[in-house]
Amino acid sequence: MRKFRWFAVTLLAVFSTLSLGWAQSPLPSGTQFKAELQQKLDSKKAKVGDKVTAKCSDNVKVSDQVVLAKGTLLQGIVTQATPAASGTPATIGVLFSQAVPKKGPALALRAAIDKVYADYSNSSVSGFSRGPEMGGNSAAVNSAMAMDSGDPANASMDRASNGVPIGYSVQQTAAGQQSDLGGVITSTGANFNLDDGTHVRLRVLDPH
C-alpha cells in the first residue's frame, strides 16, 4: 500500500511539473514580433472581453529555431475599453494568451501590443497627424514611439488606421489588481480604430 501511495504521489508530481511547463510561454519575455490584426478594433464600440485575433507576419525564432511559424493564429481579448469623452481619453487594452499553429497543439502566450505600424496603402503621408516637431499641432503624438516607415522624415508619426494620434503603454497589472491589461493603446483627442489587417508589434510579457 505504501509503495502504491508513493508511486501515486510521484506520478502526480511529474504531471504537475509537465503541466506547469506546458502553461509557460515558448518565447522568452521581451521577445518582439510582428502580427496582423484579423478584425477591426474600435475604441467607440469595443467591450471588455471581446475576442481579438491576429496572425504572425513572419516566422518567430528563438536561437534560430522557429517557435511560431508565419500565419500562426494568436488569440486574445480586450482587457480595457473606454470611448473618448470630455476629459476621458479613448483606450483599448489587448492581451494575447494563446498561439494556435496550423499544425500541432495550442501554445500558451502572454503578449501585448506595444506598437502600431503605419498603413501607407490607406492614407497619404500628407494626411497623417503630425506632432509639433513636424509643424503640426497634435501634442498626442509620442515621438519616442517611432514608426518603422523607412523615411526618416516620418519617423515620429504614430497613428491609428483612421489617422488619430495614438500612444502605447504595456501594463501587466491593473492598479491594485492582479489582472493583466496587456498593451494599452490611448488617444487623448478622439476615438480611434485599428482596421482589419493593421500591422502591430507584439511584446511577450514576463510570466506570472
Image: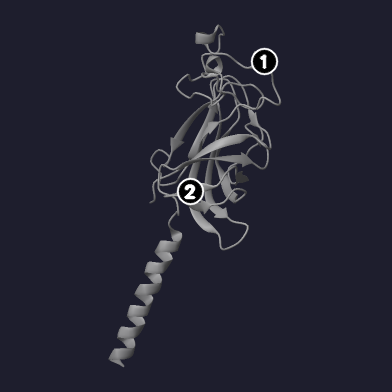
Position of residue 128 relative to residue 185, above or below, is: above
Q: Are marks 1 and 2 in contact (CB under 8 Å)?
A: no
Numbered-mark total: 2
Answer left or right for 181 relative to 127.
left
Few, some or many C-alpha atoms within 10 Å of disc 2 (few <14, some 14-19, many ≥20)?
Answer: some
Give the amino acid type for the residue marked by disc 2 in the picture: Lys
Tell me the quarter of the image containing the N terminus.
Answer: bottom left
| Residue 72 locus on image (x, y percent) | 60, 51
- Which residue corresponds to the image point at 65% horizontal and 30% vertical from the top-left? 193
> Based on the displayed image, in which of its 4 quarters is residue 19 positioned?
bottom left
**Dot 1 or dot 2, earlier in sequence:** 2
Q: Which residue is mark 2?
A: 61
Q: Tag on residue 84? A: none
Position of residue 191 relative to residue 81, above or below, is: above
Answer left or right for 29 relative to 51.
left
Give the amino acid type for the residue marked by disc 1 in the picture: Gly
* Residue positioned most to the left: 2
Q: Nearer the viewer, residue 174 or 203?
A: 203
> Based on the displayed image, in which of its 4 quarters is residue 176 positioned?
top left
Circle 2 SS class: strand
Q: Which residue is mark 1?
A: 127
* Residue positioned most to the right: 122
Few, some or many C-alpha atoms within 10 Å of disc 1 (few <14, some 14-19, many ≥20)?
Answer: few
| Residue 134 locus on image (x, y percent) | 54, 9
Nearer to us of marks 1 and 2 is: 2
User: Which colour assignment does the render follow?
Assistant: one colour
- Which residue corresponds to the image point at 33% horizontal and 80% vertical from the top-left? 9
* Residue positioned most to the front: 64
